[in-house]
């Protein structure tokens, strides 16, 4: 048996509320799905919030709603539940006024009160607001954990050099819209709150306020707007990784690389220089990797910059991270570091220089062998 009902439609917010029942006469477990779907005329998929239950729980939920709200008793379990939900929407007991996921979450709470264990789900809404090369700014409304996620990313997906996020609860949606529209009012006639959120960020991007530069700068800029308005959020991501040199040694099918990583949250290992070797599978060799790393405390960054500027006889410019990266790029150009040196010599040279700069220095070796 398969049954799908449309319980409610609101064209002003592009909202459609549906139920979907599937049961099996062959011993398989059927399901019940309640979905709160937002899909505008120009959206291919839209986004949704849903919950699912085993079909065997349908009579239990229907009986609970009848008892709690004094609703009419009908015979068929699916018909009973559809009737209950439609009646509760008419009464206002089940209302979309709370914004995205409000309907799904109310039904979810009733399921739990009835002693049931529903599963949340849905389709996220994700939009890339800005792209510059391999760097992007995007916004996601996460349907599962009820979060708004603002994300700045740098580098290809397989080798991120930086990923920086802000996480906000759905309950902050109105406040975030207020922050954005306070910077530049956006006509909100006919737009749902979700649409107004995206419109506000699109407008900020059009004004150049989300323009990408050094990793993490856009995320921190938006965090500043929210903090000034007292909007609660969680910030994630502090690592900035850059590849200084990457060479494919064809003679032994090895990827040789020199990388620099900054992470203020790593304390004594906040600055890391890594010399790595990735031997790709070859004949009867399944492949292996080796990495040799030098660590220094993040707060030694000024001392390291001063040391390398003096060593190179120049004055670098930019942020502290960019200045140290520029110093190492120059060292590679001069041949003081690079693919021409013996195994481990790059990281040993850097360790010696870090110590000469007065930085407490440690080293380590990492290896991996393909066991397939």
Image (cartoon, helix red, strand yellow):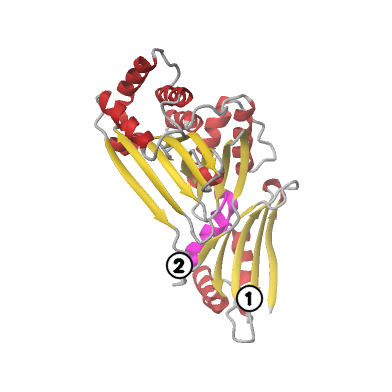
In the figure, is residue 286 to the left or right of 33?
Answer: left
Residue 106 pos. (x, y %): 52, 59
Total numbered circles: 2
Work out which residue is located at the far right of the displayed protein and give it: 41
Q: Secondary structure at mark 2?
A: helix
Picture quadrant of residue 33:
bottom right
Instruction: Using the image, determine if residue 60 lies above or below residue 206.
Output: below
Residue count near mark 2 (Cα–Cα under 10 Å), binned few <14, some 14–19, many ≥20: few
Q: State the separation of the CA atoms marked 2 and 1.
A: 19 Å
Residue 62 pos. (x, y %): 56, 74
For the N terminus, give its image quadrant. Answer: bottom right
Work out which residue is located at the far front of the displayed protein and give it: 251
Q: Is residue 157 magenta?
A: no
- Asked if labels 1 and 2 touch by Cβ distance under 8 angstroms, the answer is no
Q: Earlier in the sequence, mark 2 or mark 1?
A: 1
Picture quadrant of residue 82:
bottom right
Q: Residue 112: which numbered mark, if any?
A: 2
Label 1 sits on residue:
78
Q: Is residue 72 visible?
A: no
Q: Which residues are magenta?
A: 92-112
Picture quadrant of residue 78:
bottom right
In the figure, is residue 214 to the left or right of 346?
Answer: right
Q: Residue 257: which numbered mark, if any?
A: none
Give the residue at x 61% y 61%.
35
Query: Nearest the camera: 338 or 82?
Result: 338
Predominant secondary structure, magenta span: helix
Q: Is residue 370 visible?
A: yes
Query: Nearest the camera: 2 or 97?
Result: 2
Give the residue at x 52% y 56%.
281
In the figure, is residue 276 to the left or right of 212?
Answer: left
């Amino acid at each position: 048996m398969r049954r799908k009902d449309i319980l409610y439609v609101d064209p002003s917010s592009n909202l459609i509320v549906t139920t979907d029942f599937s049961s099996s006469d062959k011993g398989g477990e059927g399901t019940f799905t309640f979905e709160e779907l937002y899909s505008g005329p120009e959206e291919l998929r839209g986004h949704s919030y849903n919950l699912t239950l085993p079909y065997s729980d349908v009579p239990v939920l229907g009986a609970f709603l009848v008892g709690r709200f004094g609703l009419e008793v009908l015979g068929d379990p699916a018909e009973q539940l559809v009737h209950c939900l439609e009646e509760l929407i008419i009464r206002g007991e089940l209302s979309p006024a709370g914004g995205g996921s409000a309907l799904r979450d109310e039904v979810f709470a009733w399921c739990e009160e009835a002693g049931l264990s529903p599963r949340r789900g849905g389709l996220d809404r994700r939009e890339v607001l800005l792209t510059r090369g391999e760097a992007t700014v995007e916004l996601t409304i996460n349907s599962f954990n009820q979060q708004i996620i603002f994300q700045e990313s740098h580098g290809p997906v397989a080798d991120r050099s930086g990923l920086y996020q802000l996480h906000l609860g759905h309950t902050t949606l109105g406040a975030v819209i207020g922050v954005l529209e306070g910077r530049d009012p956006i006509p909100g006639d006919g737009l749902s709150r979700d649409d107004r959120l995206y419109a506000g960020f699109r407008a900020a991007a059009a004004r150049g306020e989300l323009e990408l530069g050094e990793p993490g700068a856009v995320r921190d800029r938006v965090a500043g707007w929210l903090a000034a308005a007292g909007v609660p959020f969680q910030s994630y991501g502090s690592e900035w990784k850059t590849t200084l040199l990457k060479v494919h040694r064809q003679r032994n099918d090895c990827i040789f690389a020199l990388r620099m990583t900054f992470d203020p949250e790593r304390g004594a290992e906040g600055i890391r220089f890594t010399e790595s070797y990735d031997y790709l599978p070859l004949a009867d060799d399944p492949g292996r990797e080796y990495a040799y790393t030098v660590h220094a405390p993040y707060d030694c960054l000024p001392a390291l910059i001063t040391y390398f500027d003096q060593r190179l006889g120049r004055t670098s410019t930019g942020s502290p991270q960019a200045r140290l990266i520029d110093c190492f790029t120059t060292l590679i150009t001069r041949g003081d570091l690079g693919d021409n040196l013996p195994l481990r010599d790059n990281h040993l040279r850097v360790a010696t220089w870090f110590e000469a700069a007065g930085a407490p220095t440690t080293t380590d070796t990492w290896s991996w062998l393909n066991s397939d």
